[in-house]
């Protein structure tokens, strides 16, 4: 969400869902590059996720110099990261007024 409270809540949600494996989850915020695209945000995030699977590259979270306390996951700071074993991408979208959605994409 790119807000201190939202970032902490999202970090805690990832830790809650993935448990001890959360430290191995790569988390990327492409909103750091595009800004908030309002109604198009979820669609654009989905495109980024599909391209990440196709290209085996995790998009970076740019301008991440001082993460909030408690935001201690691998946020792929500053530069895209090439990988060779990316099979799934989870795309979370949190909208104004509590309109939220999540999609999981699988490489085929």
Image: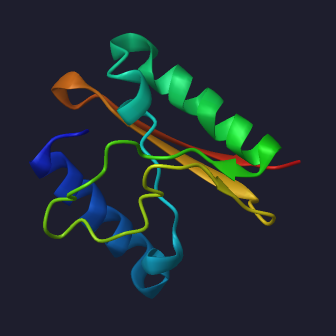
Along the line of sight, the residue nearer the viewer: 29 or 12: 29
Seen as rendered, the residue at the extreme top is 39
Q: Where is residue 100 in the image (x, y as percent from the top left)?
A: 34, 34
State which quadrant residue 103 falls in.
top right
Q: Where is residue 93 in the image (x, y as percent from the top left)?
A: 39, 35
Left or right placement of residue 32 versus residue 68 in this view: right
Total count of labels: 0
Along the line of sight, the residue nearer the viewer: 1 or 67: 67
Q: Which residue is pictured at 52% across the width and 77% down the height?
A: 24
Q: Which residue is pictured at 41% across the width and 59% down the height?
A: 75
Q: Which residue is pictured at 18% across the width and 47% down the height?
A: 6
Q: Position of residue 79 (x, y in %)?
A: 53, 50
Relative vertical location of residue 96 with respect to residue 10 in this rendering, above or below: above
Q: Quadrant of the N terminus?
A: top left
Relative vertical location of residue 95 with respect to residue 62 in this rendering, above or below: above
Along the line of sight, the residue nearer the viewer: 101 or 8: 8
Relative vertical location of residue 73 with respect to residue 93 in this rendering, above or below: below
Seen as rendered, the residue at the extreme right is 108
Q: Position of residue 48 (x, y in %)?
A: 61, 33
Left or right placement of residue 108 versus residue 7 in this view: right
State which quadrant residue 18 falls in.
bottom left
Colour setup of the view: rainbow
């Amino acid at each position: 969400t790119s807000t201190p409270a939202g970032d902490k809540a999202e970090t805690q949600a990832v830790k809650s869902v993935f448990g001890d494996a959360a430290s191995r989850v790569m988390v990327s915020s492409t909103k750091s590059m595009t800004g908030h695209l309002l109604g198009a945000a979820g669609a654009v995030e989905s495109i980024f996720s599909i391209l990440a699977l196709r290209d085996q590259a995790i998009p970076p979270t740019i301008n991440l110099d001082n993460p909030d306390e408690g935001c201690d996951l691998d946020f792929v700071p500053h530069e895209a990261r090439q990988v060779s074993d990316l099979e799934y991408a989870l795309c979370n979208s949190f909208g104004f007024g509590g309109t939220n959605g999540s999609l999981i994409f699988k490489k085929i």
